[in-house]
Image (cartoon, rainbow, N blue to C red):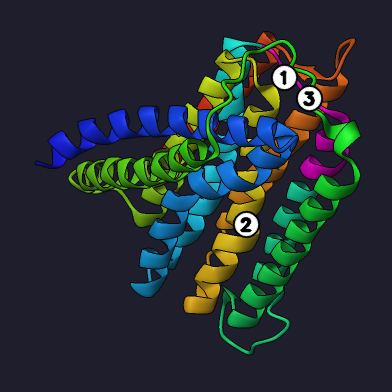
Amino acid sequence: MTYILFAIGFVLLIKGADYLVDGASSIAKKNKIPTLIIGLTIVSFGTSMPELIVNILASSDGSSELAIGNILGSNIANVLLILGVASVIKPLPIQRSIYFTEIPISLVATLLVGFLANANLFVEVKGLTLSRVDGSILLLFFALFMFYIYVVSKTNKSKLENTSDSESEINSLPTSKSILFVVGGSIALFVGGKWVVDGAFEIALAFGLSETFIGLTVVAIGTSLPELVTSAIAAKKGQADMAVGNVIGSNIFNLLWILGLSSIIRPLPFDVISNTDILMVITASTLLIFAVIVGKRPRIDRWEGVLFLIVYFSYLTYLVLRG
């Protein structure tokens, strides 16, 4: 039964992502909201649900290594694996607001998590930990980020208008159908992601792998499948803003919203070795910035996507050797 649900989960992920992109794009077109904003909010919420569910369950069970590994591993996979695959499918043009604002925000969020995990400023405990106070700080920054998105959507519509909208066909659906597509697609992504992760988790446990390794690889990749499928489909449809905004938004959500909520549910002990994974998240963001500034125009070219994939699989090899 596990293997059957595992296979069905992939189907739900693919169809759910397709419906979610169509519904979100239609909403953006009807309400004259840039698809970048939709990608950073509605789509990011929907595709981050597997990470949220896994982390809530892991935090409740006291599996801190799984919870932290899931988030850091997902963020690494989001940039290197997902944007790598999406840009190989079709080069991704990057808007000015993404590389001047959203990418730096995700980088700051990573540094904030690393600082709070290593500082132990607010609690006196043995060893490193993300405390409930740390979680509250992360949620505060998440609220500020959402306020920023709201302000941008209200004041800078003309600057953020999706230039690819005129080049790609976006189906204008009835509002009720668009909402149904977004909700139904998110549910399919959640259920499909959970079945895929559960199946992969049981398969991995059969080989006696560690909780940290499972969190950084099997669970991280499994919970990133919605982002992968959504961004790949968006890239194929010529909606680069949706593809990139989805990934950057999900990374920020993962660090500030999901990790913040997880540490409030139960403080998360932090292993020093996880600092290597935080450094990898920073490296991935740096590579993304490098890819944007290299070349005649800001975009991720196919060769840069291949480079992302090489770095990602090299990192997986390192994790295997690390055990």
Residue 35 among magenta residues: no
Pinpoint residue 271: horizontal percent, then vertical percent: 53, 64
Q: Quadrant of the N terminus?
A: top left
Q: Is residue 244 above or below residue 52?
A: above
Pinpoint residue 301: horizontal percent, then vertical percent: 72, 12
* Magenta stretch in the rendered image: 91-104
- Asked if residue 187 lies left or right of residue 283, the reply is left
Q: Which mark is residue 165?
A: 1
Q: Which residue is mark 3?
A: 94
Q: Main secondary structure of the magenta part?
A: helix
- Asked if residue 256 lies left or right of residue 98, the reply is left
- Residue sticking out furthest to the bottom: 124
Tag 1 and tag 2, C-beta contact below 8 Å: no
Q: Which residue lies at the image location 23% right of the left edge and 48% below the top edge? A: 205
How far is the residue under mark 1 from the one under mark 3? 14 Å
Quadrant of the rendered image containing residue 197: top left
Tell me if residue 50 can be seen: yes
Q: Which residue is mark 2?
A: 255
